[in-house]
């Protein structure tokens, strides 16, 4: 039997949801990135053609449009049509960055970044951090980032875990004196 959540816990969840909604609208990834070729570099690779899996090791770097990533190891899973369906990027930490439709850039890092191309969702685990330039940052042991909507969710059930966010204030318009200088 589950116990009811305490009022502070519910209030924190509501506040977190409201802040995440405020961050999401202008955080969408560039749609044109998916139409670009995926350019990958690594020290070595091993491909299992029957399983459509390629494992890249050592100094893995990739670029697809404005999306850039790097890590120590990457596992690519492809469909029967040879399209990449999923990428697991591992590192100490692994990094991912992307230009956003509304301007600015999203930068992320975690021990593991598991990107599902079909759902356009990246699951970051292990000291995960997502920074949306000019908007704020989100830290947790586990973060789920939707590259289509910009929605970010996070948290952990582990004691002492949770979410840490920094929300940047809205920029003030320049005064007449500042515009002259």
Image: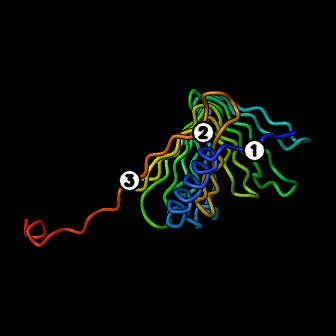
Q: Are marks 3 and 1 in contact (CB under 8 Å)?
A: no
Regarding mark 1 in the picture, which secondary structure is present there? loop
- Front tag of 2 and 3: 3
Q: Position of residue 62 (x, y in %)?
A: 59, 44
Tell which of 22 and 145 is nearer to you.
Answer: 22
Q: Is residue 150 left or right of residue 57?
A: left
Q: What residue appears at the point 50 percent right and 59 percent down from the top-left corner?
A: 23
Label at residue 4: 1
**According to the image, label 2 marks what residue?**
41
**Is the residue 58 above or below the residue 102 in the image?**
above
Sequence-wise, which precedes: disc 2 or disc 3?
A: 2
Name the colour scheme.
rainbow
Q: Secondary structure at mark 2?
A: strand
| Local secondary structure at mark 3 | loop
Disc 2 vs disc 1: which is toward the camera? Answer: 1
Q: Residue 71 at x, y = what percent? A: 59, 33
């Amino acid at each position: 039997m589950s116990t009811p959540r305490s009022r502070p816990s519910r209030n924190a969840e509501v506040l977190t949801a409201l802040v995440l909604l405020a961050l999401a609208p202008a955080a969408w990834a560039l749609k044109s990135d998916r139409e670009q070729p995926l350019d990958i570099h690594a020290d070595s690779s091993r491909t299992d053609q029957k399983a459509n899996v390629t494992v890249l090791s050592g100094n893995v770097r990739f670029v697809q449009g404005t999306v850039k990533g790097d890590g120590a190891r990457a596992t690519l899973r492809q469909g029967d049509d040879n399209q990449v369906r999923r990428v697991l990027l591992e590192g100490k930490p692994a990094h991912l960055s992307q230009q956003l439709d509304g301007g600015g850039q999203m930068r992320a890092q975690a021990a593991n970044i598991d990107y599902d191309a079909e759902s356009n969702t990246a699951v970051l685990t292990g000291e995960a951090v997502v920074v949306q330039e000019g908007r704020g940052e989100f830290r947790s042991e586990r973060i789920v980032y939707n590259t289509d909507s910009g929605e970010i969710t996070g948290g952990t059930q582990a004691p002492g875990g949770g979410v840490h966010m920094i929300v940047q204030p809205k920029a003030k318009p320049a005064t007449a004196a500042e515009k002259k200088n």
